[in-house]
Image (cartoon, rainbow, N blue to C red):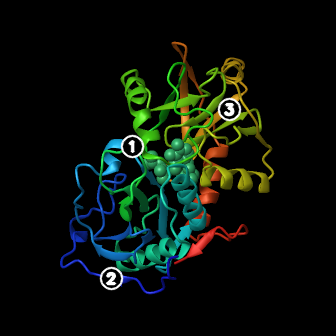
């Protein structure tokens, strides 16, 4: 059993890198803040988390993360409002999902207070790093991996939980054109697709590289069995608007249960937008693109926020989605970011004051 953690030890960095950062021109996830949260699992339990200066870590070459890929992560954001109050968005959902992912990868689950109090302590120390500029935020990356040693193909006996943060701007620069995948699969029934497991992303890189070479930015994954159903994109869930109805696929063993996705569904419904959560075939989308009823496609995720898709490729054909004014994507993006950044009421109780 782990003791409840209220006071987190803080070891402050001797210098800061913040003066070198151009907060007006942030890219995504490249600049890391001055501190990180570090917590070790050893002797059968999680040890007290500490905030320490951001620094490289030393691992044994036989650490199981390198050989067997036992690693899971989360993605969250912190926002600063006009009064410098710091906000998170549905952070307990990220905590719960991290443990869901960990369980699937045979990684010991974290106690809630280690995650939440550790995160709050880190955000207090690095609070100057949380951008105020519109469209920017502090991207937060909690992750857990096997640091325990040995080549035996079995779960490690030691793990590290780290939270690192990066002040960030948009994930995509410019319009997103996607390729609907016909050959490769991201996940399969009974697999780890629903988990934020590092290996899910490694497995996507090669097919995504091939798509990039053909002029697309992301792959839209289809089901591994028939490649007929739209699943999700590499780093975001997918929404499709046919006429006035917004459609997204149901979550499953194979699809990440996105926090942005479920928020968008609730938000859209509350604004009177017809939403259908149902399986959607590629042929339905192709047909809608041909007959003009495909009005919008967009991705939704923490990093991507709401990212409009300008067109897609499928079976060597390209389909453009004509630009419209007053899109659902821009309407929903504004509403969700206004809630996240404390610019509007939050009738859903999603915003979390740090
Ligand atoms: N799908 C995948 C594969 C992702 O990596 C992400 C990003 O976290 C999402 C969907 C969106 O999830 P969320 O909205 O919780 O960030
Ligand atoms: C996120 O949106 O937080 C993600 O984890 C996607 C990531 C692969 C950049």
Q: Is residue 59 visible?
A: yes
Quarter residue 341 falls in: bottom right
Whether residue 266 sits left or right of residue 114 in the image: it is right
Question: From the viewer's perspective, is residue 28 above or below residue 320?
Answer: below
Earlier-in-chain disc, 1 versus 2: 2
Image location (x, y in percent) of residue 120: 46, 77
Quarter residue 192 falls in: top right
Instruction: Report the number of discs.
Output: 3
Label 1, label 2: how far apart the Cα atoms are: 36 Å
Question: From the viewer's perspective, is residue 228 above or below residue 272?
Answer: above
Earlier-in-chain disc, 2 versus 3: 2
Some atom of ligand 1 lies within 8 Å of the CB belonging to the residue at label 1? no
- Determine the residue located farthest toward the front in the rendered image: 152
Observer-side mark, 2 or 3, equals 2
For disc 2, the marked residue is 10
Which label was assigned to residue 44? none
Whether residue 291 sits left or right of residue 96 in the image: it is right
- Determine the residue located farthest toward the bottom in the rendered image: 7
CB within 8 Å, label 1 to label 3: no
Image location (x, y in percent) of residue 124: 40, 80
Label 1, label 3: how far apart the Cα atoms are: 49 Å
Which label was assigned to residue 295? 3
- Determine the residue located farthest toward the top in the rendered image: 316
Name the secondary structure under disc 3: strand
For disc 1, the marked residue is 153
Q: Residue at x 77, y 38 (%)?
A: 245
Whether residue 243 sits left or right of residue 45 in the image: it is right
Some atom of ligand 1 lies within 8 Å of the CB belonging to the residue at label 3? no
Image location (x, y in percent) of residue 290: 67, 17
Q: Is residue 306 visible?
A: no
């Amino acid at each position: 059993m782990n003791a409840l953690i209220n006071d987190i030890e803080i070891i402050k960095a001797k210098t800061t890198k913040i003066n070198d950062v151009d907060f007006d021109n942030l890219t995504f996830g490249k600049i890391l803040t001055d501190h990180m949260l570090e917590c070790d699992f050893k002797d059968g339990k999680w040890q007290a988390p500490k905030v320490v200066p951001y620094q490289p870590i030393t691992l044994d070459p036989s650490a199981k993360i390198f050989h067997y890929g036992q690693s899971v992560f989360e993605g969250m954001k912190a926002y600063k409002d006009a009064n410098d109050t710091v906000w998170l968005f549905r952070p307990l959902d990220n905590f719960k999902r991290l443990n869901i992912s960990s369980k699937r990868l045979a990684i010991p689950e974290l106690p809630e207070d280690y995650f939440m109090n550790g995160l709050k302590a880190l955000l207090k120390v690095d609070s100057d790093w949380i951008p105020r500029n519109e469209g920017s935020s502090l991207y937060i990356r909690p992750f857990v991996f096997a640091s325990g040693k040995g080549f035996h193909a079995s779960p490690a006996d030691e793990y590290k939980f780290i939270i690192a943060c990066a002040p960030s701007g948009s994930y995509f620069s410019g319009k997103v054109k996607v390729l609907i995948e016909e050959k490769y699969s991201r996940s399969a029934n009974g697999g780890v697709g629903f988990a934020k497991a590092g290996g899910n992303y490694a497995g996507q890189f090669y097919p995504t590289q091939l798509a990039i070479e053909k002029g697309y930015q992301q792959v839209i994954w289809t089901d591994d069995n028939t490649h007929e159903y739209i699943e999700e994109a590499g780093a975001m869930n997918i929404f499709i608007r046919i006429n006035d109805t917004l459609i997204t696929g149901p979550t499953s063993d194979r699809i990440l249960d996105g926090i942005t996705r479920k928020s968008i569904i609730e938000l859209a419904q509350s604004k009177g937008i017809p939403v259908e959560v149902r399986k959607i075939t590629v042929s339905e989308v192709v047909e809608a693109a041909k007959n003009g009823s495909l009005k919008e496609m967009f991705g939704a995720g923490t990093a991507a926020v709401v990212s409009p898709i300008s067109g897609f490729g499928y079976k060597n054909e390209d389909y453009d989605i004509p630009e419209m004014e007053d899109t659902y994507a821009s309407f929903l993006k504004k509403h969700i970011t206004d809630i996240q950044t404390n610019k509007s009421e939050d009738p859903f109780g999603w915003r979390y004051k740090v």
